[in-house]
Amino acid sequence: MIVAEQKPLEEINGLLGDKQRVLVVGCGTCVTVCFAGGEKESTILASALRMSSRMEGKPRQVSVCVVQRQCEWEYIDAIREPIEEADCVLSLGCGVGAQALAERYPNKIVIPGLNTSFMGLPVEQGIWAERCQACGNCLLALTGGVCPIARCSKQLLNGPCGGSVGGHCEVNPDIDCAWQLIYDRLKAQGRLEMLLEIQPPKDWRTSRDGGPRKIVREDLRLVDADEEPGSEPR
Amino acid sequence: MSEIGIQEMAAQGMQALRFEPEITVFTCMYCGYTALDTAGALKLAYPASLKVVRLPCAGKLDILYLLQAFEEGADGVMVVACPLGNCHHVQGNRRAKARLERARNLLEKIGIGGERVHMVLVSGGQGGTVAREAQLHVERVRALGRSPLRLREDGRLEARR
């Protein structure tokens, strides 16, 4: 899932400036389960914003609206009315959700309330860790299911480096050495010979180096009746 | 000092004496509520300005409840729960404690002040302890004064008159 955390209250207050009617739009998917922008966090933030604005002597009207997924048109189309009534929209979705709102409601000022951090999982309650960097060419089959792109600080394909100490990374001892994890996993599986194969430099064009990415699935597209399937997507 | 000055001071003093903090108390229905009940059974008085909200467990305590208490006009909040290790739902009191810390942090940032929130961990028989802690918290909040949220708005209302 996408993991995010809320911006500090002072920063959000600063971004809102003198806006009077604020609509906090939460998201019911990834940021709900990482406790950053779901219904609970949205209502807590709204209460904090109302009180801090009252403390400053400029009370804001802060209301809350939570959609199931802020990154899909059909869900954000359903909240047109409260959005139109607000002076500005404070998105508690990830960067995708905030951009979706800004794109769908181009006349509205959309302010991000979250910092989108990474794609990861809750390793235990209250702790999230990065697991994927969306490089666009998954190599987990080569590395025993441990991603060296997301989990090795140096993104090495032929690790470990000399900074692996007792299973920890030299960049930060709190980080497990991904290549130690890979070695341990492959050893336990009796597949250590896989590490003898030297991996060539990675083609990063499938990652961000190729520019913003897009996936087109012709079998899923809704084409107009007079449009030929396979024509250039809009 | 002029006579008017003294009169003003006396009026302020009377005002301070009159200030009875509004304290919202969130309590679990086990040790916390029983302790408050025990205080009553022992005929131990605690301030009447305490408004008790009974929760099925301190684990039901939400940061939003704490914030909304202040938003709705409380001067202070007290949370009463079972002693650590004795929660009837195992971890409810620990969860409440962690949430209370985050609420304190938020209240500091808002400018209301985290010290207005107090947590008391008691067993059901500790009526005397809970009554004493309630009295102490009322005095703590009385010393801090009315919630700055109310103070500002009361001040503005006064100015408009």
Image (spheres, coloured by chain):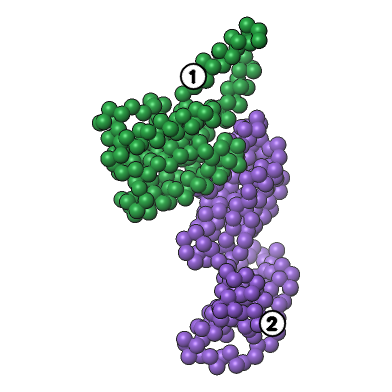
The chain coloured purple carries which letter?
A
Identify which residue is drawn at 70% across, 84% down: A201
Q: Nearer the viewer, mark 1 or mark 2?
A: 1
Three-letter amino acid code at the position of disc 1? Leu
User: Along the line of sight, which residue is nearer the eye, B2 or B87?
Assistant: B2
Identify which residue is drawn at 58% across, 75% down: A168
Give coordinates of residue B34: x percent, y percent. 29, 39
Q: Which residue is situated farthest in the front direction here?
A: B1
Badge 1: chain ID: B
Three-letter amino acid code at the position of disc 2? Lys
Asked whether the residues under the numbered discs 1 and 2 touch, taking CB atoms below 8 Å apart as contact, a structural biologist would say no
Q: Which residue is mark 2?
A: A202
- Chain B: its colour in the image is green
Quadrant holding the C terminus of chain B: top right
* Disc 1 secondary structure class: helix
| Discs 1 and 2 carry the same chain letter | no
User: Along the line of sight, which residue is nearer the eye, A122 or A40?
Assistant: A122
Relative horizontal placement of residue A222, taking residue B22 as reference (left or right): right
